[in-house]
Amino acid sequence: MRLYVTRHGETPLNADRRVSGLADVPLTERGRAQARALAGQAAGKGIGLVIASPLQRAQETARTVAEALGVPLRLEPRLRELDYGRYDQAPIDQPDFVRIKRQFAWHMGGGESILDVAARVYPFLDELRSRCPEQTVLLVCHGTVCRVIHSYFCDLTNEDFWASIPENCQLRAYDWRARGAP
């Protein structure tokens, strides 16, 4: 099985350079165009199932791809973005946020830590691997979740972890057999 992973299309919060944790926001027109382009990229890759975070921006992106490919769409709550607590919708360059967001065990503003996200995403990936061993799947999720998924497949330094955020609707591929870099 091949696993594809993407981050949702652009949202108003992304465009305004604001933290978008559990804020349930739609895509911008640019985000919708990114989702359509992603559907074109995904065509011919043998994707038989799309699984998405239940947050609106991921669902909208996933629905665009699933409909274009004619495959089922399933929602998975473990793919939701990190709960940034009081930092949700704050400017991403706010000094306090910049300082603490790189702390893996720090609960962001009363929300979750990176370790909390890994604790829900890693078991989901293990389950997916055992339940769909022959199926090619696309996961549509969020920046931090994409980083955590990348760390499941690749050894990363803390610096590499933070540098590994994909662009909106960037498609990454992983091979379960190699469980190595895309």
Image (cartoon, rainbow, N blue to C red):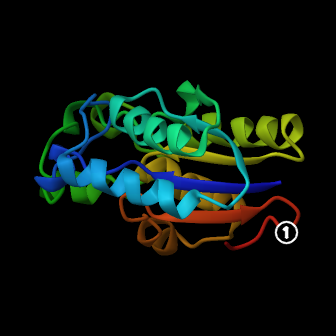
Q: Which residue is mark 1?
A: 178
Q: Position of residue 54 (x, y in %)?
A: 46, 26
From the viewer's perspective, is residue 97 above or below residue 37?
A: above
Q: Place residue 122 in its image quadrant.
A: top right
From the viewer's perspective, is residue 17 above or below residue 68?
A: below
- Decide if residue 49 is on the left or right side of residue 7: right
Q: Nearer the viewer, residue 157 or 74?
A: 74
Q: How many marks?
A: 1
The residue depicted at 61 percent of the width and 38 percent of the height is 70
- Decide if residue 103 is on the left or right side of residue 160: left
Q: Position of residue 75 (x, y in %)?
A: 56, 26
- Decide if residue 51 is on the left or right side of residue 49: left
In the rendered view of the protein, which quadrant contains the N terminus?
Answer: bottom right
In the rendered view of the protein, which quadrant contains the C terminus?
Answer: bottom right
Amino acid type, label 1: Ala
Q: Secondary structure at mark 1?
A: loop
Q: Residues within 10 Å of mark 1 (few under 14, many from 20)?
A: few
- Decide if residue 84 is on the left or right side of residue 76: left
Q: Position of residue 129 (x, y in %)?
A: 83, 44
The residue depicted at 43 percent of the width and 41 percent of the height is 64
The residue depicted at 50 percent of the width and 66 percent of the height is 161
The residue depicted at 39 percent of the width and 29 percent of the height is 55
Q: Nearer the viewer, residue 20 or 174?
A: 174
